[in-house]
Amino acid sequence: MSQNPFRYFKASPEIIQLGMLMYVRFPLWLRNVQDLLHERGIDACHESVRLWVDRFGTYFANKIRNRRSEAMRRFKQWRWHLDEVFVKIRGKTHYRCRAVAHEGEVLEAWVTKNHDKAAAVKFLRKAMKSYGNPEVVVTDKCPSYCAAMKVIGNERREETGRHSNKRAENYHQPFRRRERAMSRFRRMRSLQKFASMHLSVHNHFNHQRNIERRAGFKSLRDAALREWRELLVV
């Protein structure tokens, strides 16, 4: 029988999960989360919220990823969109790469110092190990992706176009808003850790309300919240 991971904390698991959800899902400062918890009658310091996210963010993200991995393997993600954004860490430029499926599911997020052929090959192999080999890979004509596709043997599956990769570019926006609220990152390791947990939480609660009817959207939202609460079952 596994030990309870919340055994050394005075706050209940439900409060820890709520504080972690507020901070990761929404672009809030730590003190904003503290004030929102106070309105609900919960006395928690902002440093406690920071500790909860650092300690249990990966714990909840892995649980979400394990639950969704089975469903993702049933339906082949035949079309991927690859894109990258620049991230400043202590004045130095890093690259945050993303692979987005054709239905909007963020498959993989990877932070690297150099966006060259070796980094692109490592990123693609990591994503393919979990989700298989896609039939079409849409890129933004980045030379490193073109070279990596030749190494992997998918150069004939690459597709480029002026507006073909808008899906991947738009999915950087939620993380950009979260990054501004956190006043940037100080270390590459912390960026990769938070990007991984933000990816899982964003996928779990992300429903395209523009293509769903109101009743269907409410049903999906309620189901996502119910599954989120069930993650506390050890």
Image (spheres, rainbow, N blue to C red):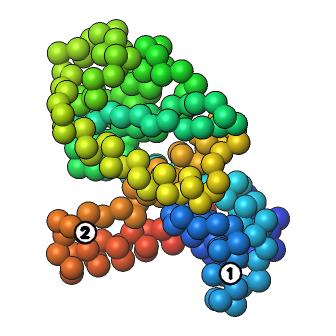
Q: How many numbered marks have been drawn onto this rendered protein structure?
A: 2
How busy is the neighbourhood of tag 1: few (under 14 within 10 Å), some, or many (20 plus)?
some
Q: Amino acid at mark 1?
A: Asp
Q: Does residue 221 sit above or below 122 in this rendering?
A: below
Towards the viewer: 138 or 232:
138
Q: Viewed as shown, does residue 198 lie left or right of 153?
A: right
Q: In terms of depth relative to the viewer, which is nearer, 86 or 138? A: 86
Label 1 sits on a secondary structure element that is helix
Identity of the residue drawn at 48% across and 68% down: 228
- Tell me where residue 157 appears, x and y as whole percent: 18, 21
Residue 28 is drawn in which quadrant?
bottom right
Looking at the image, residue 23 lies above or below residue 218: above
- The x and y percentages for residue 48 are 77, 67
Left-right relation of 119 to 214: right
Location of mark 2 (residue): 209
Q: Is residue 202 visible?
A: yes
Q: Which residue, given by chain and number where applicable, does mark 1 sit on?
A: 35
- Residue sitting at x 41%, y 52%: 173
Question: Position of 32 compared to 78: left or right?
Answer: right
State which quadrant residue 60 falls in: bottom right
